[in-house]
Amino acid sequence: MESKAIARFARVAPRKARTVVNLVRGRKVAEAIDVLMFTRKAAAPVVRKVIESALANAKNSDPNVNIDNLYVSVASVDKGPNQHVRRWRPRAMGRATKVTKGVSHIVITLSDTVPQRAAKKAERSAAYAAKKAASTSETSAAPTGE
């Protein structure tokens, strides 16, 4: 089950929005919303609203969906057009340059399957924990030289 939400023409620079989107990609929805609540970036409220909209879309399409099992599977930010905010800045020797304001299209897709990246991360952390436990049990079982 997948649900999607798009924020088009968000007045946030794409480069700055991508840093916030990278924080939540692959996480559970509740965890992603918690992270965004305490992120002090201008794009965080916009991304949070898009995730909440995708969550509402999921509830609307399937009322029996388990919200606790939803992940942020796809999160991307694309550059929008800059045609409506055209301003000029005076430069040296009588010239002028265009002031470009950032406009973003933010796409969030939620799904109930674990993203591959998150699954690999969980697998690596489990393997590391097992290796760490094995090495601590070996050192505690090894005789001391005293």
Image (cartoon, helix red, strand yellow):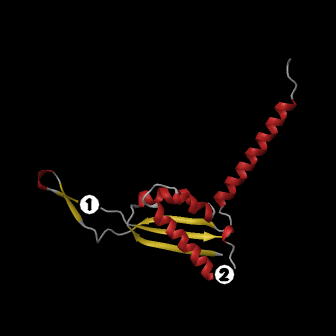
Please indicate whether residue 92 sits to the left or right of residue 98 in the image: left
Please rate how many residues cluster around mark 2, counting C-alpha atoms within 10 Å: few if below 14, some from 14 to 19, many from 20.
few
Relative vertical location of residue 126 with respect to residue 37 in this rendering, above or below? above
Q: Is residue 26 visible?
A: no
Please indicate whether residue 99 sits to the left or right of residue 27 in the image: left
Compare residues 3 and 51 and report the one nearer the observer: 51
Residue 122 position within the rendered picture, expressed as x and y whole percent measured from the top left: 70, 54
Relative vertical location of residue 74 with respect to residue 119 in this rendering, above or below? below
Residue 48 position within the rendered picture, expressed as x and y whole percent measured from the top left: 51, 65
Q: Comparing marks 1 and 2, which lies closer to the viewer?
A: 2
Residue 116 position within the rendered picture, expressed as x and y whole percent measured from the top left: 66, 60
Are the residues at dot 1 and dot 2 in contact (C-beta closer than 8 Å)?
Answer: no
Q: Give residue 133's quadrant in the image.
A: top right
Q: Which mark is residue 63?
A: 2
Q: Which mark is residue 6?
A: none
Please indicate whether residue 142 sits to the left or right of residue 41 in the image: right
Relative vertical location of residue 83 with respect to residue 101 in this rendering, above or below? below
